[in-house]
């Protein structure tokens, strides 16, 4: 971060207010999962706009740990924001009835992420609000997100922050300890954890990304090679859709 925690909090809250004002929106819709990223974003949105202009939605599936709902309810109670709980199992069940459906955890996980974002946008459209994203810079750089799922949003207030910076901001915002200490997980399948899936811890990942960036994105050891490969393979997730837009058509 380029300033201290208090300064960063103010910068982000100003960003959120500016985005809402420029769009003529009534507020924001946020998907809360029980994890640190969405908790921090919900708290920042409340600090920026007031709790009455923040709507939170918890969208559990059969693989969502029960503790997540408890943490979400406490967070929203502490922040005094409205919480909607919409299970997505029925929708995912409809996908399973498609011809040729393959029961593969990552594939189903992507469907869950995109389904959740569709629901958030429905409610945002319904109430003239913007969808506020919860992606951090660490996961964005390595592509640890679902395209048009959890990385889709109208504004991304913590996209410039590493995972470790998000935790620091969480301390400043007094996010509940059960959320702060929780093992990061998208809950997309039974027993899933982010660090287990990535094969690297967030502190090591953040440090490695910082070293790579300082060294012009040139890897110097095996861990840096692994992380750099993640960055390279996920470029398409950070770019606009490939097209010929902007080129001049030629006829004859």
Image: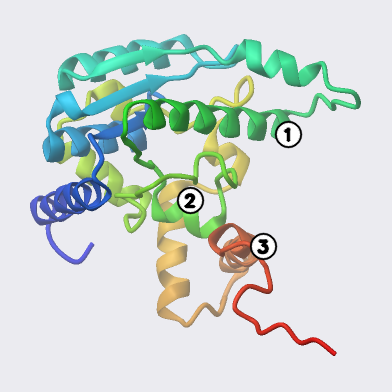
The residues tagged by marks 2 and 3 sit, at their Cα atoms, a distance apart of: 13 Å
10 Å neighbourhood of mark 3: few (<14), some, or many (≥20)?
Answer: few
Q: From the image, tell me which residue sits under label 1.
A: 107
10 Å neighbourhood of mark 2: few (<14), some, or many (≥20)?
Answer: many
Q: 142 above or below 179?
A: below
Q: Left of 241 or right of it: where is 56?
A: left
Residue appearing at x 23%, y 53% in the figure = 22
Q: Position of residue 169 (x, y in %)?
A: 21, 44
| Nearest to N terminus: mark 2 or mark 3 | 2
Can residue 245 be seen? yes
Q: 93 above or below 219?
A: above
Q: 219 above or below 123?
A: below
Which quadrant: the C terminus? bottom right
Query: Under tag 2, what secondary structure?
Result: helix
- Of badges 1 and 2, nearer the viewer stands 1
Q: Position of residue 186 (x, y in %)?
A: 52, 31
Say if mark 1 contacts mark 2, CB within 8 Å. Answer: no
Instruction: Check residue 233 in the rendering and tell me which mark sits there, or answer none.
Output: 3
The residues tagged by marks 3 and 1 sit, at their Cα atoms, a distance apart of: 18 Å
Q: Nearer the viewer, residue 232 or 124?
A: 124
Q: Left of 127 or right of it: where is 216?
A: right
């Amino acid at each position: 971060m380029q300033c201290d925690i208090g300064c960063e909090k103010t910068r982000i809250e100003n960003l959120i207010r500016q985005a809402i004002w420029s769009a003529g929106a009534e507020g924001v819709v946020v998907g809360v999962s029980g994890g640190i990223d969405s908790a921090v974003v919900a708290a920042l949105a409340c600090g920026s706009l007031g709790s009455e202009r923040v709507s939170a939605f918890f969208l559990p599936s059969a693989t969502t740990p029960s503790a997540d709902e408890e943490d979400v309810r406490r967070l929203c109670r502490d922040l005094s924001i409205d919480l909607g709980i919409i299970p997505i199992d029925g929708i995912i069940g409809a996908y399973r009835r498609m011809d040729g459906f393959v029961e593969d955890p990552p594939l189903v996980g992507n469907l869950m992420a995109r389904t959740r974002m569709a629901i958030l946008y429905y409610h945002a459209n319904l109430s003239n609000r913007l969808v506020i994203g919860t992606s951090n810079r660490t996961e964005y750089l390595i592509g640890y997100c679902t395209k048009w799922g959890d990385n889709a949003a109208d504004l991304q207030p913590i996209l410039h922050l590493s995972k470790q910076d998000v935790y620091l901001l969480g301390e400043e915002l007094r996010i509940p300890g059960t959320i702060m200490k929780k093992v990061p997980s998208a809950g997309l399948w039974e027993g899933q954890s982010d660090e287990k899936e990535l094969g690297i811890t967030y502190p090591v990942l953040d440090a490695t990304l910082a070293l790579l960036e300082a060294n012009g994105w040139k890897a110097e050891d095996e861990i840096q090679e692994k992380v750099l490969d993640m960055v390279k393979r996920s470029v398409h997730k950070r770019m606009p859709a490939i097209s010929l837009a902007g080129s001049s058509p030629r006829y004859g």
